[in-house]
Amino acid sequence: MSDSLPSETTPTDSEADGHSHAKQGLAKLALGAIGVVYGDIGTSPLYAMKEVFVGHHPLTVDQLHIFGVVSLMFWSLMLIVTLKYVLLILRADNNGEGGSLALLALIQRQSGHGKRWGPSLVILGVLATALFFGDCMITPAISVLSAVEGLSTVQAGFDSWVLPISIGIIVALFYLQSIGTARVGKVFGPIMLIYFITLAGLGVLNIVNRPDVLMALNPIWALRFAMNDGTLAFLALGSVVLCVTGAEALYADMGHFGRRPIQFAWAVPVLPALMLNYLGQGALLLDNPAAADNPFFFMASEDFRLPLVILSTMATVIASQAVITGAYSVVQQAVQLGLMPRIRIDHTSASEAGQIYIPVINWALLAMVLLLILGFKESSNLAAAYGIAVTGTMFITTCMMGVLFRRVWNWPLWVVAAFIGVFLMIDGLYFASNLTKVPDGGWFPLLVGILIFILLTTWARGRQLMIERLAEAAMPVKIFIQSAASSATRVPGTAVFMTSAADGVPHALLHNLKHNKVIHQRVILLTVKIADVPFVPEHKRVMQDDLGQGFHRVVLKFGFMQEPDVPVALKLVTKTCGGEFKMMDTSFFLARQTLLPSEKPGMALWREHLFAWMLRNAESAMEFFRLPTNRVVELGSQVEI
């Protein structure tokens, strides 16, 4: 923590610029959404049905169970994905952006920060973010493994090649992240469109042989399944929910494409293709129960299986790419909102702001994905770990929806209770079912979620304590100017002192005067604030105040999806701040605090040590704020929290 960190998230006008998608056209954006947004849920047919019948709680492959499972999948897609996410959650955009953190910021801004349920809401948002990272680790592993496992349906001798090929694909995927995906991403949409057409085609070919499988769309079959064997039906929910994995991506990726293209893509190619494929797998199992070992690939004839494996592998790589990109985006939001330390973020495209690459996250994800593949070895084993991360995030999103509906959208209480009650029951059943798989691998996302939750909350709390301690020792600006400005020696040039507080004298200024005995002719007290909207337009970027005797206070506002480039932003400062800024005549002074853990109340001692470690390893303020390296002076001090 230092004076140069962004200050606490502050509200700004809701009129801040969002995304403008109108110029690109609905069809083009919908095609892009098919390639990015629906990659994860689109690859679910590779393993969802297989896991239900031959997974950790296998079912007898007969008409009752086949119809019951297909019915559960259909109504899960309709209620959870279509109603909850596509029709309701997508309306909750934070100036074009979606995701748990964007939803949290939206609710806080629209309903006020001082509500008694505010801290609980923040905890829910942070917990959902923590579980999301567990999802980011499992998705590439289970998707690529399930696709490459299709080789065993081509020829039995290929079994030994599954792990090496999967590892090679994963390593290549993460290695190419630093290059950027702008060019390759243009072919994602067409490839996934071909993939979804293939899903639908395979489904239709098998439905024609057993058209009676269409009766499974009747919810009565799901009820019969539950009434026939309630315990087995409950356990099966842990695998059935795999058909909706990736639903959170619809909301998280909204900023890239907009609401209407995502809704259009779901309604036209994606939902029909998924349901036709699940029906087709059900039809296949009615005729050939032995195909339950890998129903997706057994739907195709032997001659078509190898091309299907190749196409499916490409689809899983695209799905993995979308999840990795989503992880970068969430990390960027978390850093800007003060939930993570400053971290190096590289921009891989000069024209597209969303094209970013975060080296430390990339290699950490690669290491965890490889450990998962080597540790679990089969997609069926990973399925046990997958469900908890997905259902946990969905349950938390439903809780946040309740606050949104009531406090922001002002829905009547009985309407909120009806909607949220239904979704909490559905999500709760799925989550409870997945908890039974904790010993079989479900412990992994829980462990990852707990560790990341501890890191995020420790940083946020430590940062808050640091700001409070620095504020306690701060001197009022007016008193400082009156006492020091007239007596100290003034030297030519501009000094910019960065501070996390919008009042008081920065510690760097006090240290500079103490040690160098001088004050520059123009002194800028600069604060960078990260607003709880994704984008702040340039005309609202700068707030400035003339303090007299060459002192000026400047506040720069950025959205949580924007890069805080201070030199570029200072060009927007008008002449009322003493004229334009010339970098060769400007020096930037930063305060770097060294944390001294103490027994003061605030955080447990072990968390203070953890916060100190995170502080030492954070990216320097010079790099984070894009300051010119030859114009920066750092002054150190020590502080106890």
Image: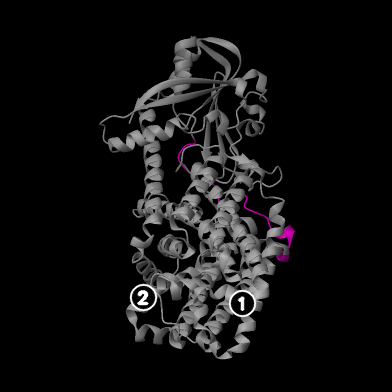
What separation in Å lies between label 2 and label 1 (alpha carbons)? 26 Å
Placement of 529 over or under 184, stated as above or below: above
Residue hosting label 2: 234
Residue 96 in view in this figure: no
The amino acid type, in three-letter code, at marker 1 is Pro
**What is the chief secondary structure element of the magenta stretch?**
loop
Residue 384 percent location from the top left of the image: 41, 64
Q: From the viewer's perspective, is 2 left or right of 541?
A: left
Residue hosting label 1: 272
Marker disc for residue 127: none
Which residue range is magenta in the image?
6-27
Q: Residue at x 64, y 59 (%)?
A: 257
Q: State which quarter of the image contains the C terminus.
A: top left
Give the farthest residue toward the front: 157
The quarter of the displayed image where residue 56 is located: bottom left
The quarter of the displayed image where residue 493 is located: top right
Nearest-to-viewer mark from 2 and 1: 2
Would you call the spot at circle 2 few (<14 residues within 10 Å), some (14-19), or many (20 or more)?
A: some
Residue 243 versus residue 125: which sits nearer the camera? 243
Residue 9 versus residue 31: which sits nearer the camera? 31
Residue 482 within the segment the image draws in magenta = no
Placement of 360 over or under 591, stated as above or below: below
The quarter of the displayed image where residue 388 is located: bottom left
**Which badge, 2 or 1, is on the more N-terminal residue?**
2
Q: Residue at x 55, y 84 (%)?
A: 283
